[in-house]
Amino acid sequence: MNILILGSGGREHALAWAVKQNPKCDRLIVAPGNAGIAMLAECADIDILDGATVVTFCEENTIDFVIVGPEAPLAAGVADACRAAGLLTFGPSVAAAKLEASKAFTKEICDACAAPTAAYARFTEAEPAKAYIRQQGAPIVVKADGLAAGKGVIVAMTEAEALAAIDDMFGGEFGAAGAEVVIEEFMAGEEASFFILTDGTNALPIGTAQDHKRVGDGDTGPNTGGMGAYSPAPVLTEALQQQAMDMIVLPTIREMARRGTPYQGVLYAGLMIENGRARLVEYNARFGDPEAQVLMMRLGAQALDLMLATAEGRLAEAQVNWADDHALTVVMAAKGYPGAYARGSVINGLDRMPEDSRHMVFHAGTTLRDGLVTANGGRVLNITARGATLEEAHHRAYAMIDLLDWPEGFCRSDIGWRALPE
Ligand code: AMP
Ligand code: GLY
């Protein structure tokens, strides 16, 4: 079959790598793609936020299956447009993707199905929001309701920080995303990510992961999109996964279906684990980035069969075949990230990297210039390895990084630390 993947990051490179290994895939196009993706698929420079453009492209290229990678096209209704045109599509509708696009909506769903999550209140004006913060005290969490590229959440350790966040949000720092604000109870504990495929009715857990949001070693410095990840996440035990399915995920899927807006695609549940209890931090309507890189490394070609079963409503009969293995990915970023960074530096040493079922370099922000791979983003490469243990995967990934010659880049040296032996 002919398959189109929408997106251009490390997540989409990992999806493309897995899909390409499946003999069902005849032709693979990624739009817009990047320099790494171009080594295994065709890339097409189209506007992936415009449903009509994507549908026309699919018709012209006899696409049989569309996989939507990032949240922006989902929130822009691209999956709806594709389905309306009769295209088999992996990814939720705008109405269902609200589980990521609106934090207030997610809270409403949690209330309706009694899913455990932080206590909260919603505000559209600064003064009552500030009064609530003064009454609750710190630590407290202030969130812009809408999509803010991962930047709309302030975990305030002091009341002053929380009050300043209110001024920023209602002052327009996050545009329309900050017109409504959700203020939440601070949850202590350890965070982990749980990935579930659902066709709207049936649900199939496909793995756990943990990422590293802070830029510096020892979880210091500013927040980023994620500096590395590993799978599985030992903190999410079988018992906790079952609890999260029973108390959070399945009730959410039933509530979405009951409202006439069934959720189809991958549901990414960010969980906070404390004292043997899982609570929902947030939902995302897509695979995580860089979590997809470690999940795809472990799933391989079956990822395509699972996404097809999701889109075709056949998840009841699907199952995941797990190897008892571990995967770890280290993000190489341009110096300065998540602040200002330069583009255009040349990345050498990629040809020395092994690329096989245990080693992969997924490209996140790269472009080809005069035949050379150059950095074209903040997060640039995801050096990914698999092993029988997490330690082995860790050693393999960092051994690959030693082969890289890119002085303008940096990475964290401690990815996986929570789960690695001392
Ligand atoms: P979100 O965009 O909702 O995932 O929030 C970004 C990050 O903020 C999360 O990954 C958590 O680390 C943190 N966070 C969000 N909500 C809470 C909360 N209620 N308590 C503690 N930390 C939180
Ligand atoms: N790595 C976090 C995310 O994809 O949202």
Image (cartoon, grey):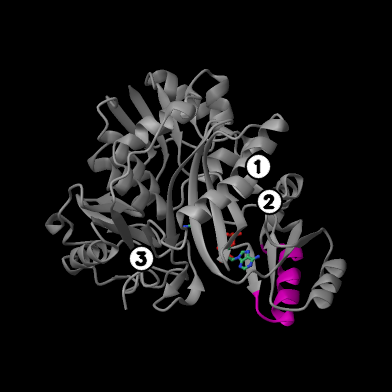
Determine if residue 34 is in view.
no
Cα separation, mark 2 vs mark 1, equals: 7 Å
Secondary element under disc 3, as helix, strand or loop, is strand
Q: Position of residue 221 (x, y in %)?
A: 48, 78
The quarter of the rendered structure image containing the C terminus is bottom left
Q: How crowded is mark 1: few (under 14 residues within 10 Å), some or many (20 or more)?
A: some
Secondary element under disc 1, as helix, strand or loop, is helix
Residue 251: mark in rendering: 1
Residue 333: mark in rendering: 3
Q: Residue at x 38, y 18 (%)?
A: 62
Sequence-wise first label, 3 or 2: 2
Is disc 3 in contact with disc 2, using a CB cutoff of under 8 Å?
no
Q: What residue type is labelled 1?
A: Pro
- The residue that disc 2 covers is 115
Front of the two marks 3 and 2 = 2
Residue 22: mark in rendering: none
Q: Which residue is drawn at 68% across and 51% down?
A: 115
Q: Residue at x 42, y 30 (%)?
A: 318
Q: Main secondary structure of the magenta part?
A: helix
Q: Which of 190 and 16 is in front in this view?
A: 190
Seen in the picture, residue 64 relative to 340 is either above or below; the reply is above
Q: Where is residue 180 in the image (x, y as percent from the top left)?
A: 76, 56
Q: Nearer the viewer, residue 271 or 21?
A: 271
Q: Position of residue 95 (x, y in %)?
A: 66, 36
Q: Residue at x 67, y 70 (%)?
A: 186
Is disc 2 in contact with disc 1, using a CB cutoff of under 8 Å?
yes
What is the span of residues highlighted in magenta in the rendered image?
156-173
The quarter of the rendered structure image containing the N terminus is top left
Q: Which amino acid does label 3 sit on?
A: Ala
Instruction: Determine if the C-beta at disc 3 is less than 8 A from ligand 2.
Output: no
